[in-house]
Image: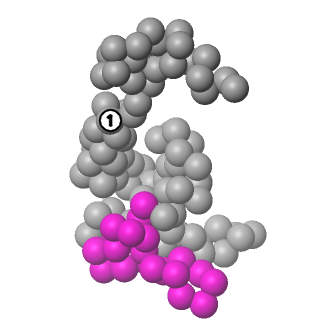
Amino acid sequence: MSTKYLSTTVLSKELGMATKELFEVFDKSGYINRVDNAWVLTDLGKEKGGTIRKHPQHGNYIAWSEKIKSDSIFTQQQNDDEESAKNLLNATKISEHFGISRFRINLSFQR
């Protein structure tokens, strides 16, 4: 069975992310670097399933093995997002803390 490769744009759509955001994730993780206004695949990126593909009209681009979707950079980000959501405040949490009706809390923010 041959490995299926996805462009970063296609991969971003499958992951439900903006393409720019995915490039930032790969950059921060050390899988790619920005050199002279172009993205360059790093050795770590190659180890993680990245490769250079050539498009007849658009030239070279970075493609990723579809296995990259289960990489820890995505599972860790999901865990971070879930942890951040737990720490968000809402009217109910504020009202419980201060012993005030959540409706009064909402009203105070509408003024």
Of residues 99 and 36, the one nearer the viewer is: 99
What residue is shown at x 71% (from left), y 70% (from top)? 58
Screen quadrant of the C terminus: top right
What residue is shown at x 50% (from left), y 68% (from top)? 62
Position of 25 with respect to 8 (left or right) is left
Question: Which region of the structure is painted magenta?
Answer: 25-46
Tag 1 secondary structure: loop
Label 1: few (<14), some or many (≥20) within 10 Å? Answer: few
Query: What residue is pinned by disc 1?
Result: 87
Position of 27 with respect to 106 (left or right) is left
Q: Is residue 84 visible?
A: yes
Residue 34 on the magenta segment: yes
What residue is shown at x 51% (from left), y 63% (from top)? 23
Residue 65 on the magenta segment: no
Name the amino acid type tagged 1: Asn
Residue 50 lies, with reference to residue 77, above or below; the image says below
Q: Quadrant of residue 28?
A: bottom left
Q: Residue furthest bottom?
A: 36
Q: Is residue 82 visible?
A: no
What residue is shown at x 59% (from left), y 81% (from top)? 38
Q: How is the image coloured?
A: one colour
Measured as percent of width and height from the top left, residue 32 is found at 42, 74
Position of 82 with respect to 51 (left or right) is left
Of residues 99 and 54, the one nearer the viewer is: 99
Measured as percent of width and height from the top left, residue 33 is found at 45, 80
Screen quadrant of the N terminus: top left
